[in-house]
Image (cartoon, helix red, strand yellow):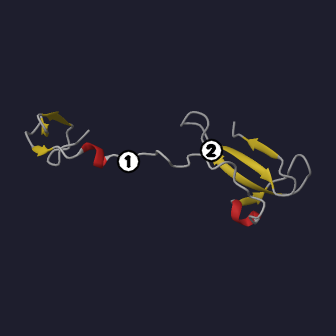
Amino acid sequence: MEFCDECGSMMHGEDGSWICRSCGFEKAKGDDESDMTTTEGQDMDSGPVDMSEVDDAEIGPTTEARCPECGHDRARYEMKQIRAADESETRFFTCVECDHKWREDDH
């Protein structure tokens, strides 16, 4: 698929060239295979990531939050939009002491 350099419209392939039906701009088709990228031979799944040697401070931000499991007062957090865009994000916590996970929603 090509887009017109002049007006930005989608171009159509005709007789070895690309032609813009909006403004008439024309350019030669290149070697389509040379413009392609392939993932053949690439390792798409390197497996699980070993985080045992990573310092907790490098994993993500932390905040004061009491763990409902062990009572520790510090947790890593992440915010995600899992409901409609007009609703607030959900906060996901992981205790830095016992790795217990929980979430907190605004209602």
- Residue type of the residue flagged with mark 2: Lys
Which residue carries the number 1 mark? Answer: 37
64 sits to left or right of 36 = right
92 sits to left or right of 10 = right
Q: Which residue is painted at 20% across and 46% down in the image?
A: 30
Classify 20 as above or below 61: above
Numbered circle sitting on residue 80: 2
Where residue 18 appears, as percent x and y from the top left, is 15, 39
Where residue 11 appears, as percent x and y from the top left, is 18, 37
Earlier in the chain: of badge 2 and badge 1, it is: 1
> Which secondary structure lies at badge 2?
strand
Disc 2 crowd, CA 10 A, few/some/many (<14, 14-19, 20+): few
82 sits to left or right of 27 = right
> Which secondary structure lies at badge 1?
loop
Where residue 60 appears, as percent x and y from the top left, is 69, 59
Q: Which residue is painted at 70% across and 60% down in the image?
A: 59
Tell me the quadrant of the picture where the N terminus can be found.
Answer: top left
- Residue type of the residue flagged with mark 1: Thr
Residue nearer the viewer, 37 or 85: 37
Q: Farthest residue in the front direction?
A: 41
Tell me the quadrant of the picture where the C terminus can be found.
Answer: top right
Where residue 19 appears, as percent x and y from the top left, is 12, 38
Query: Residue 13 appears in which quarter of the rendering?
Result: top left
Q: Farthest residue in the left direction?
A: 24
Q: Which residue is painted at 61% across and 41% down in the image?
A: 88
